[in-house]
Image (cartoon, rainbow, N blue to C red):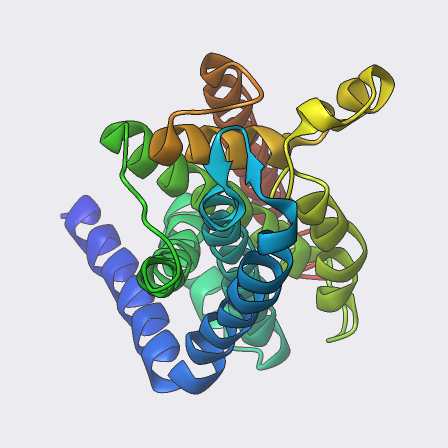
Amino acid sequence: MRLKADLIGLQTIVYREYKRIMRIWMQTLLPPSITMTLYFIIFGNLIGKRIGQMDGFDYMQFIAPGLIMMSVITNSYGNVVSSFFGAKFGKHIEEMLVSPLPNSFIIIGHVAGGLMRGLLVGVAVTIIALFFTKLDVQHVWITISVVFLTSIVFSLAGFINAVFARDFDDIAIIPTFVLAPLTYLGGVFYSISLLPDFWQQVSKANPILYMVNAFRYGILGVSDIPIAWAYMIIGGFIVLLFSLSLYLMKTGRGIRE
């Protein structure tokens, strides 16, 4: 009976997150679609013609997986950080905290919301990409699993950011000064094989590089890094971030203060 009640609570959080995403779709789904369209037009169509090919593919085709993954990362992160901080700011997080719902279910419910938004935007951007280039998926299960796992990683990261955030400015610091630079330097627009050896090694310290390349491998069949490494890094981040989220919820750090 307790498990059934917990599952109902989890379902309620997931449904609320879904309704929130769809209710404000002009903020959650439309802007990233427009932004990615501009990326395809400017970087892929205009600049891409001057660059030519990269790793044996037209530049537009090469950057498409990176742009799809970039949209998934930013929207998965943004959905959870705004939703959970909104619950803190509106004080209705207290209703969940005093309920018998396990902390793990609260986290999973919010992560599911980030996953939904990330995948919805990812599908939208993929459809947009097909208007500009051709994408023949080479490894279906790698493509699907990488995008799911990456979305979970950044949903958990957004949850942690929301826990520590004290005002709305705090939820913008990480996306602006950490997430955006790592994404742009994560091989979205170029292959790290073009870099000098030293900067190739520096780039390999960027976890987003592995996620972007694994996703690109799933679609195009090319990657700058071993795919097994990508899965190990993504899996390690999921375990680490979920454990940290549970610890923060248990101790009440940033929530009950």
Residue 100 makes an appearance in the image: no
Quadrant into which the C terminus falls = bottom right
Quadrant of the image occupied by residue 11? bottom left
Q: Position of residue 222 (x, y in %)?
A: 45, 24
Q: Position of residue 132 (x, y in %)?
A: 39, 61
- Residue sitting at 51 percent across and 14 percent down? 226
Comparing 85 with 149, the one in front is 149
- Residue sitting at 44 percent across and 46 percent down? 61
**From the viewer's perspective, is 169 left or right of 17?**
right
- Residue sitting at 51 percent across and 41 percent down? 153
Q: Position of residue 249 (x, y in %)?
A: 57, 48
Residue 167 makes an appearance in the image: yes
Q: Position of residue 187 (x, y in %)?
A: 64, 37
Quadrant of the image occupied by residue 13? bottom left
Count of picture labels: 0
- Residue sitting at 73 percent across and 63 percent down? 165
Q: Residue furthest right?
A: 198
Comparing 228 with 187, the one in front is 187
Comparing 204 with 199, the one in front is 199
Residue 153 versus residue 83 in the image, above or below: above
Residue 225 versus residue 161 in the image, above or below: above
**From the viewer's perspective, is 62 left or right of 100?**
right
**From the viewer's perspective, is 165 left or right of 250?**
right
